[in-house]
Image (spheres, rainbow, N blue to C red):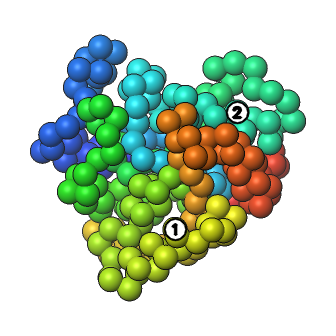
């Protein structure tokens, strides 16, 4: 499955209007800096991962969640599905095909700094549309605070407060919360968010605990080889 031609054009047009895309890294790997990096697998996969933004390895391979943090996620997925350690990089790519992958903004920022709220808003409607129209699943594992609170963009004061309060809960990495998304076409769907910390090695507070927390989530969501699609 892929983006529609219209969606592809809209992403490129939106990307051309912003500053901060790490053009130097795209050029190094001979990649187009206007091309969005979204991991659109089969539309009927049950579970998606929602992260912050692509990094250098994602640009290099043209695929999201393939760098250090993504490998941590994919390693856990492989072990959950096959009961053994992930053998190599190719296996990490293959296991990703059973899940949907998306970020707040599908472009690498300079210096790997999180995109500003202004830029996230710039892409928000189109990202909502991709989630609603290009994927049939409604279960999202969010990675980190930036990814989770993306779902409060453009919301009422009460809804923003509800999500921020949930994020402050001590049990947020064991609990879930429902949110309704609406795109610019007026289409709306309810998604269930299962937050986790960001899997970056720089996230010293949670990095060592991340594999265990993800394993717990995968068990909670009954992830197994015969239960990956709707």
Q: Which mark is residue 75?
A: 2
In the rendered structure, the answer to whether residue 6 lies left or right of residue 1 reads left
Look at 46% across and 80% down and name the residue there. 162
> In the orientation shown, which residue stands out farthest toward the right?
83
The percent position of residue 93, horizontal first and vertical second, equals 61, 28
Label 1 packing within 10 angstroms: few (<14), some (14-19), many (20+): some
Tell me if residue 21 comes above or below residue 152 in the rendering: above
Disc 1 versus disc 2: distance between alpha carbons? Answer: 26 Å
Look at 52% across and 68% down and name the residue there. 167
> In the orientation shown, which residue stands out farthest toward the front?
205
Disc tally is 2
Tell me if residue 181 comes above or below residue 47 in the rendering: below
Residue hosting label 1: 167
Front residue of this view, candidates 178 and 11: 178
Q: Quadrant of the C terminus?
A: bottom right
Front residue of this view, candidates 165 and 180: 165
Q: Picture quarter containing residue 78?
A: top right
Q: Is residue 13 visible?
A: no
In the rendered structure, the answer to whether residue 93 lies left or right of residue 29 reads right
The percent position of residue 82, horizontal first and vertical second, equals 84, 35
Q: Nearer the viewer, mark 1 or mark 2?
A: 1
Q: Is residue 176 visible?
A: yes
Q: Picture quarter containing residue 141?
A: bottom right
Look at 55% across and 34% down and name the residue there. 201
Local SS, label 2:
helix
Q: Picture quarter containing residue 113?
A: top left
Front residue of this view, candidates 75 and 7: 75
Local SS, label 1:
helix
Look at 58% across and 46% down and name the residue there. 205
Q: Earlier in the sequence, mark 1 or mark 2?
A: 2
The percent position of residue 159, horizontal first and vertical second, equals 40, 81
Q: Are marks 1 and 2 in contact (CB under 8 Å)?
A: no
């Amino acid at each position: 499955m892929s983006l529609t031609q219209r969606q592809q054009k809209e992403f490129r047009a939106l990307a051309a209007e912003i500053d901060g895309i790490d053009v130097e890294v795209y050029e190094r790997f001979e990649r187009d800096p206007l091309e969005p990096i979204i991991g659109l697998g089969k539309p009927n996969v049950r579970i998606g991962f929602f992260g912050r933004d692509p990094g250098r390895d994602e640009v290099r391979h043209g695929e999201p969640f393939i760098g250090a943090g993504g490998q941590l996620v994919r390693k856990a997925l492989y072990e959950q599905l096959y009961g053994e350690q992930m053998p190599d990089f190719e296996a990490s790519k293959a296991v990703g095909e059973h899940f949907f992958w998306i970020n707040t903004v599908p472009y690498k920022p300079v210096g790997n700094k999180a995109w500003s709220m202004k830029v996230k808003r710039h892409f928000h409607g189109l990202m909502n549309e991709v989630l609603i129209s290009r994927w049939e699943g409604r279960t999202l594992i969010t990675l980190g605070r930036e990814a989770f609170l993306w779902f409060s963009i453009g919301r009422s004061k009460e809804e923003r407060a509800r999500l921020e309060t949930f994020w402050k809960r001590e049990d947020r990495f064991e609990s879930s919360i429902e949110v309704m998304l609406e795109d610019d076409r007026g289409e709306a769907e309810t998604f269930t968010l299962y937050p986790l910390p960001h899997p970056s090695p720089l996230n010293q507070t949670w990095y060592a605990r991340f594999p265990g927390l993800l394993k717990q989530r995968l068990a909670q969501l009954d992830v197994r080889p015969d239960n990956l699609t709707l």
